[in-house]
Image (tube, rainbow, N blue to C red):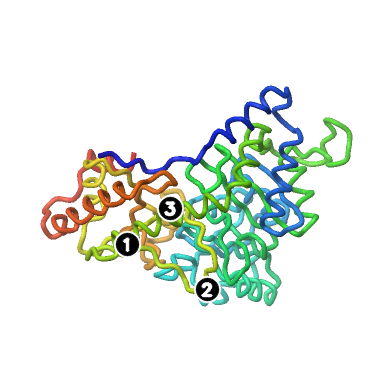
Amino acid sequence: MRVQLAKPDITQREIDAVIEVMKSGIISIGPKIKEFEKKIATFIGVKYAVAVNSGTSGLHLIVKSLGIGKGDEVITTSFSFVASANCFMMEGAKPVFVDIDPRTFNMNIDEIEGKITKKTKAILAVDVFGQPMDMRKLREIADKHNLFLIEDSCEAIGSGYKGDKAGSLADAGVFAFYPNKQLTTGEGGIIVTNNEEIALMSQSLRSQGRAITGFWLHHERLGYNYRMSELQAALGCVQVDRLEEIIHKRQVVADMYNKELSSIDGITIPYIAPKVTTMSWFVYVIQVAKEIDRDRMMLHLKENGVGCRPYFTPIHVQPYIVKEFGYEEEDYPISSDIGRRSIALPFHNYIRLEEVKYVAKVIQEGVSTLNVKDYVASTTVDELNKIFL
């Protein structure tokens, strides 16, 4: 049996919507963008939404709109995709990392104030794997120290903490729509905010710095081509309408995994904080026990037809970050430990119970045979290529 790692949930409705736009003759800078933005803003409960071509672009535009730049510091987590730090590093700001909670994998809020200096300009929170943070507590810290608060909710559209939807309480938040996300537009992202200045600046910057109300080809500032196309927006409009359905489907798959994996010794299944009111699952990630060779477990899974990936290699150990800032692996020991032991399992809306049972069977076999002490040599380069490529 082969179990696919990820797969978008695309129906005939999405296909028809895209074909309709193709027939219209307007495939960029048209009405579907505005419709998609309005749907997202309404769903999140904010005044403004600005569609862009990726979550990374959205984060970058927020950073630009807030004036974060050279000499500034931004407090964030290392346990995330690199875009969470790249977005402000591109403007010359320095990442100041906070280690994570060992159960939720979100940054440890209690450590944040100890990292604040005169150079700190913002806190960038990340809702890791779809698990939302306590943004009200972060809002209090940011306001107390006169800092901007950015929420990277690229993995968490639809999630909620104590009833607050992800993306709704920061100065600005971002969602991303890569094909493995809950909601997809193929590639794409969107900024959400209640701040008109951020919205207007982001609208200008995403389109080469054009004036929002000015003449065509009149550019007021240096900008970028970060626009989303009408085709992507049409796909997104249908996906938003189906989002509650999609989130429910993913919860069903997560529940199947929880049931089948919870009794297997040697692995840990995801923990969801009790104050999370809605968990919008992005991926399903387990951790193997320290005595189990994670990489060999992944190789075992792949050799048995089970798709998998290491989620995440922490940002502070990425080669370009180490070269620039000199961080060491144990500077953030919890992030490093979780990064070494995590495996993302196949997770999408079409997974069947028999496939989940098969994944569980393969994992159980691996746990029984892949104790790291059984191996003299470490994983070979060829084996690592099979795992990571």
Q: Residue at x 58, y 39 (%)?
A: 185
Q: Residues within 10 Å of mark 2 (few under 14, many from 20)?
A: few
Residue at the spot 61% in from the left edge and 72% down from the top edge:
138
How far apart marks 2 and 1 lie (CA) works out to 21 Å
Residue type at mark 3: give it: Val
Given residues 16 and 56, the one toward you in this image is 16
Q: Secondary structure at mark 3?
A: loop
Disc 3 to disc 2, C-alpha distance? 20 Å
50 vs 240, left or right, is: right
Which residue has dot 1 on it?
259
Mark 3 and mark 1: span between their CA atoms?
16 Å
Mark 3 vs mark 2: which is more N-terminal?
A: 2
Disc 1 crowd rating (10 Å Cα; few below 14, some 14-19, many 20+) is: few
Identify residue type, mark 2: Lys
Q: Mark 2 highlights which residue?
A: 275
Label 3 crowd bin: few (<14), some (14–19), many (20+), radius 10 Å: many
